[in-house]
Image: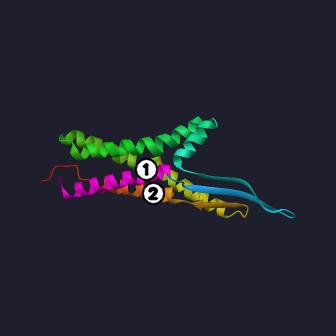
Amino acid sequence: MKARNIIALILIIISLICLYPGLTQPILSIKVGAKLPLVGNITLHESIQSILDTIKTLHQNNNTLVAFLILFFSVIVPVIKAILLLVVLFFKNLKQRMSIHKFVYIIGKWSMADVFVVGVFLAFLATKSNESIEAHIHSGFYYFLAYCLISLLAIQIMQVEESK
């Protein structure tokens, strides 16, 4: 195995290690409150959820399509992408390796996981502009962000063609 592919293998493993806490640890907490003249500050709503918690909550609240899209693009696609990259590394047939790598490269660029990370970050920034809303990004966000960046790097450095 070429040095680039060994590095890619290590990066794939690290990305999968980051993916698990990225899905299970809290990513964002939101606290909505109000300041009332006689009562003071009161909390109207408070939530802290991971990606998997969010999927479950959306499904329970009959937002099945949104829950499925987040599940598909944040859980299923990343796992399939990692499995396919491992197949590329260990498969012997060059033509099939190149086809699978090209497919993973294409879905890697259009993966909604990266869009999800940006969306969470924008939601965080948007809530920061309102006094009655507090938002905090948690470790799950950073793990998921690390997964996105490391898996994209693994795809970029992987070498599929035969050495000359």
Q: Position of residue 51 (x, y in %)?
A: 52, 48
Q: Which mark is residue 20?
A: 1
In the image, 43 versus 28, the foreground residue is 43
The span picked out in magenta is 1-24
How far apart are the two marked residues, 1 and 2, measured between alpha carbons? 8 Å
Which picture quadrant has residue 101?
A: top left
* In the depicted structure, whether residue 70 falls above or below residue 43: above
Q: Position of residue 40 (x, y in %)?
A: 81, 64
Left or right, 4 with reference to 47: left
**Residue 45 is covered by the magenta coloring:** no
Left or right, 129 with reference to 12: right
In the image, 120 versus 99, the foreground residue is 120
Q: Name the residue under label 2.
A: 143
Q: Which amino acid does label 2 sit on?
A: Tyr
* In the depicted structure, whether residue 35 falls above or below residue 82: below
In the image, 115 versus 3, the foreground residue is 3
